[in-house]
Image (tube, helix red, strand yellow):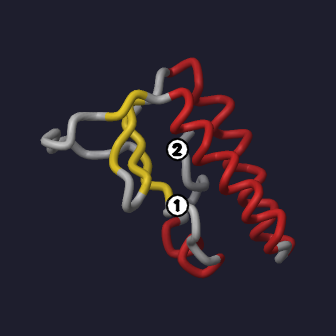
Amino acid sequence: MIVRILTEGQFEVPDTLVDHLNELDNAVLAALDSGDEAEFKVSLAALLGAVRAGGTPVAHDYLGASDATLPFEDATVDEVRELLQHDGLIPG
């Protein structure tokens, strides 16, 4: 899976990490639903950190599409809501 973090670039994430990313994505969604901005920031940082730690940066000249697009770390609640798909930020 190719995951783009806005303002950072793309990461190739192994399939073995997708379930964990979905758990972290669910935590972001729960924080959005509850309106808990502090928990939202913590959850978003955890999701982005997992992609950075478990993924491999894709070459800057790679022009392929991303399977998921994640916000930049300092994104607001409203900015993240604009990126949401019907199943969250991470498909699946």
Position of residue 88 measured from the top left corner of the image (x, y, whole percent) = 60, 55
**Mark 2 Cα-neighbour bin, 10 Å: few <14, some 14–19, many ≥20:** some
Please state the horizontal and vertical placement of residue 87, each as a whole percent of the image. 60, 53
5 sits left or right of 30 in the view: left
Question: Of the residues shown, which amino acid type is indicated by label 1?
Answer: Gln
Residue ranking furthest to the top:
16
Instruction: Residue 61: name its quadrant.
Output: top left
Mark 2 secondary-structure assignment: loop
Element marked by disc 1 = loop
Q: CA distance from mark 2 to mark 1?
A: 8 Å
Counting every numbered tag in the picture gives: 2
Q: Is residue 80 above or below residue 23?
A: below
Residue 32: name its quadrant.
bottom right
In the rendered structure, the answer to whether residue 42 lies left or right of residue 57 reads right
Residue in the image at 41% along x and 31% along y = 1
Which residue corresponds to mark 1? 85
Pick the quarter of the image with the C terminus.
top right
Look at mark 2 in the image and give the residue it sits on. Answer: 91
Mark 2 vs 1: CB contact within 8 A: yes
Q: Residue at x 40, y 28 (%)?
A: 56
- Depicted 69 relative to depicted 32: above or below: above
> Which amino acid type is marked by label 2?
Pro
**In the image, 10: left or right of 31?**
left
Upstream in sequence: badge 2 or badge 1: 1
> What's the residue at 52%, 44% (across, down)?
91
**Residue drawn at (50%, 62%) of the image:** 71
